[in-house]
Image (tube, helix red, strand yellow):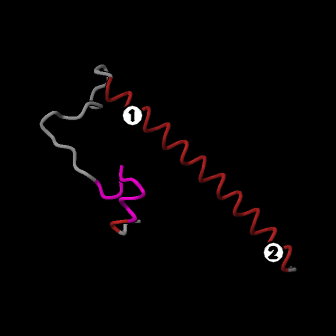
Amino acid sequence: MEHEEQAREMERDAEEMEEHSDKVGERIEETRREWEAKEQDPSIPGAQPDPDDEEESVPGVGADEETLSEEGGP
């Protein structure tokens, strides 16, 4: 296999991976919106957080890129 052919194949692979990544990101956002809507709907049992429980923070979740870079996160 020639170097140019390998380079083209790697570029196609990278484009395909980027496309898959975009689709996964879209699904994550869609799922997040659906869950947030369900949390607001009292007719969906178990979707509302228990008022006695405090929400625990999960490292990296909901953090912005600037905070992560300052803290040396993922």
Q: Amino acid at mark 1?
A: Trp
x 43%, y 32%: residue: 34
**Residue 55: percent from left, percent from top:** 21, 44
**Magenta-tinted stretch:** 58-69
Is the residue marked by circle 2 packed among few (<14), some (14-19), or many (20+) residues within 10 Å?
few
Is residue 30 positioned above or below 19 on the image? above
- Residue 59 position, x and y percent, is 31, 58
Which quarter of the figure is the C terminus placed in? bottom left
Picture quadrant of residue 13:
bottom right
Residue topped by disc 2:
6
| In the displayed structure image, the side of residue 24 where residue 10 appears, left or right | right
Against 31, residue 66 (above or below) is below
Identify the residue shown where x is 65% and y is 56%. 18
46 vs 34, nearest the viewer: 34
Question: Is residue 31 highlighted in magenta?
Answer: no
Could you say which is closer to the camera, residue 45 or residue 41?
Answer: 41
